[in-house]
Image: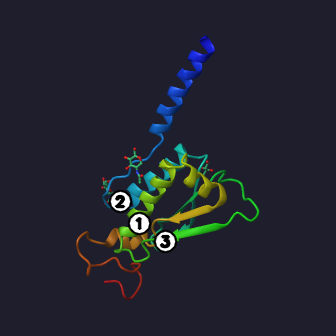
């Protein structure tokens, strides 16, 4: 009897923890500091599902973050395909950057559901929210013609 009660208790705890594990990312533009904080935090709290790495640094020295999402991220499984998403190539075209953060949250939020679980068991999904973090920092929200499209040292940046 006691063991059934404690099992139920554990199940309740598990559900609570699981709910707390879901991610809410606000619908605002996240600058480099904020984006880095989110990615590092996810890397800490969901190490069973993600692995955060950098493919190098931007012209101004910002990390070019990629978040790998998959079941057993530290295990390279033969014939498990790798796919990548790359966003925010033009620094001031930033909706993709936020969509990638939301996609990460969606995959993690739903990692227990059959369809997403299948996806994460059979695919290694690499997500790079920002390919041009320098340009993003130069951009001005609401100004499409302003600076930030290219990297700062590019002769076409203005
Ligand atoms: C980045 O955004 C945060 C808010 O999320 C703000 O506190 C901080 O000042 C911003 N940093 C820069 C360099 O704009
Ligand atoms: C992400 O977490 C792993 C441990 O799960 C660690 O080895 C790795 O260095 C972390 N990545 C970053 C960029 O901090
Ligand atoms: C993830 O779950 C949180 C908490 O339920 C929710 O607020 C958020 O909108 C979800 N995000 C996505 C992209 O599913």
Label 3 beta carbon less than 8 Å to ligand 1:
no
* Pointer 3 local density, CA inside 10 Å: few below 14, some 14–19, many at least 20: some
Q: Is residue 19 left or right of residue 49?
A: left
Q: Residue at x 42, y 72 (%)?
A: 88
Q: Residue at x 48, y 41 (%)?
A: 21
Q: Does 6 sit above or below residue 43?
A: above
Residue 118 drawn at (x, y percent): 62, 55
Residue designated by label 2: 30
Location of the N terminus (image quadrant): top right
Q: Name the element at disc 1.
A: helix
Mark 3 touching mark 2, by CB under 8 A? Answer: no
Ligand 1 within 8 Å, label 2 CB: yes
Between circles 3 and 2, the one closer to the viewer is: 2
Q: Residue furthest top?
A: 1
For residue 3, what is the image quadrant?
top right
Q: Secondary structure at mark 3?
A: loop
Real-space Cα separation, disc 1 to disc 3, in angstroms: 16 Å
Residue 15 point in image, percent of width and height: 50, 33
Where 154 sits versus 51, above or below?
below
Q: Quadrant of the C terminus?
A: bottom left
Q: Which residue is mark 3?
A: 58
Residue 18 rendering spot, x and y as whole percentages = 50, 37
**Callout 2–callout 1 Cβ contact below 8 Å:** yes
């Amino acid at each position: 009897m006691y063991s059934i009660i404690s099992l139920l208790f554990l199940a309740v705890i598990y559900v609570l923890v699981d709910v707390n594990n879901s991610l809410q990312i606000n619908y605002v533009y996240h600058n480099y500091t904020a984006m880095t904080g989110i990615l590092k935090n996810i890397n800490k709290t969901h190490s069973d599902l993600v692995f955060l790495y950098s493919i190098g640094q931007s012209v101004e020295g910002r990390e070019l973050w990629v978040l790998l999402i998959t079941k057993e991220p530290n295990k390279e499984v033969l014939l498990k395909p790798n796919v990548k998403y790359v966003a925010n190539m033009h620094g001031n075209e930033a909706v993709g950057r936020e969509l990638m953060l939301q996609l990460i949250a969606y995959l993690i939020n739903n990692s227990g559901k059959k369809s997403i679980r299948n996806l994460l068991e059979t695919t290694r999904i690499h997500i790079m929210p920002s390919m041009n973090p320098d340009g993003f920092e130069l951009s001005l929200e609401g100004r499409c013609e302003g600076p930030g499209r290219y990297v700062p040292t590019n002769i076409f940046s203005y």
